[in-house]
Image: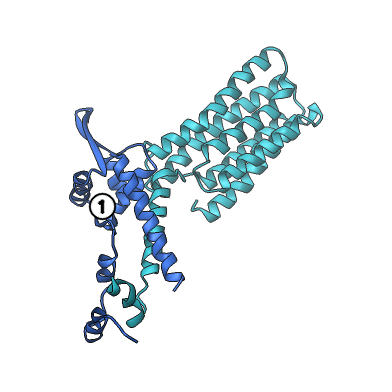
Chain colours: A cyan, B blue
Amino acid sequence: MAFAQRAPKLTKPIPIDRKAADNLRFIRDTMERASSFTAVPGWGGVAIGFTAVVAGILAQGRAPELQFRIWLAEAAAALIVAFFTVRAKSRRLSQSLKSRPARRALLSFMPPLLAGAALSIVLARHSMLFVLPGLWLLLYGAAVVTGGAFSVRIVPFMGLCFMTLGAAAFLLPQTWGNLVLMLGFGALHIVFGTVIARRHGG
Amino acid sequence: MAKSAAVKTLKNKPAPSLEQVESSVPNLDRVIHERMRLGIVSALAVNDSLSFNELKKLLQTSDGNLSVHARRLEEAEYVECEKSFENRMPKTEYRLTARGRKAFERYLNHMEALIQAMRER
């Protein structure tokens, strides 16, 4: 016992605490990599942002029914871009899309979107299209928060921004819907996408 | 100035290596302490279960290395494994046992205590 306690004092200081700290860091890093899915594509977000800006320009000043269709087409385009860019980034980070963290991220990303789809159908049937911009931003934001809960911190933060904008959209005049969508799906995606691409590798 | 006999003999010896000091620290769990095994246990601590291939990819190691260390953890009953077939391919799923989780927590506390002890010096 005396040996264990005094040895560091007698000889050159042995950085046993540094070794322990290094062990703890290794544990933390392993736990993090084992549980988080970080292949959120920054440039993909930027690309999606641009498709949204294009959709917004096309939809500006059109009848609500046509605007609705244009934004639906935009959602489909965004989904395709998202699929390919997520796949590309996860390959680059050698994170399998079938891995548990990836599946968990997808599983927690989906429910708010499905809720949004169901509500959209109901609201469209009742010709309440003016509710949709706020609803879409709010629920997409919720999906990003839940899906990105175990990703880099900026992802859930982006989700919160979408949710805030969505909530604000309900307070704005109905005619601003298209602009709010452009601001959300366009500008927010472009801004956050650029930050993620710069800081988190593409 | 009365120093113990152990300390006196130490003066003439070369400085003890870090490993020597660590191995003399009581209760250090050698099963978990090894890097690869520490990695396996850490990864399983945040997942219900992980397959052999998932662990291999995560820890960036070879089949042989992983299976040796996984077996050692199995022998200590820190992890349990379940072998099955998926599309006719053998699949091994590892899971942390209650005993393993306790050992992991003990190890974490131990590392923290080491750091704390050095700070208080």
Kindly identify the residue that appears in the image at 39 percent across and 55 percent down. B109
Kindly identify the residue that appears in the image at 43 percent across and 40 percent down. A87
Q: Position of residue B83 (x, y in %)?
A: 20, 33
Residue B95, image quadrant: top left
Q: Nearer the viewer, residue A186 or A60?
A: A186
Question: How many labels, in total?
Answer: 1
Q: Chain of mark 1?
A: B
Residue A145, image quadrant: top right
Q: Position of residue B112 (x, y in %)?
A: 42, 60
Residue that lies at the very extreme toward the front in this rendered image: B2
Residue type, label 1: Thr
Kindly identify the residue that appears in the image at 61 percent across and 37 percent down. A51
Query: Can residue A26 be seen in this snapshot?
Result: no
Q: Nearer the viewer, residue A111 or A120?
A: A111
Which class describes the residues within 10 Å of circle 1: few (<14), some (14-19), or many (20+)? few
Q: Position of residue B75 (x, y in %)?
A: 18, 45
Residue B98, image quadrant: top left
Q: Height in image: A176 above or below B41? A: above
Query: Can residue A44 be seen in this snapshot?
Result: yes
Kindly identify the residue that appears in the image at 64 percent across and 15 percent down. A122
Q: Is residue A193 left or right of residue B30?
A: right
Q: Is residue A7 left or right of residue A185?
A: left
Which quarter shows the N terminus of chain A?
Answer: bottom left
Q: Height in image: A170 above or below B110? A: above
Residue that lies at the very extreme toward the right in this rendered image: A173
Q: Height in image: A201 above or below B113? A: above
Q: Is residue A161 left or right of residue B108?
A: right
Q: Height in image: B64 above or below A163? A: below
Mark 1 lies on residue? B61
Q: Secondary structure at mark 1?
A: loop
Q: Nearer the viewer, residue A67 or A29?
A: A29
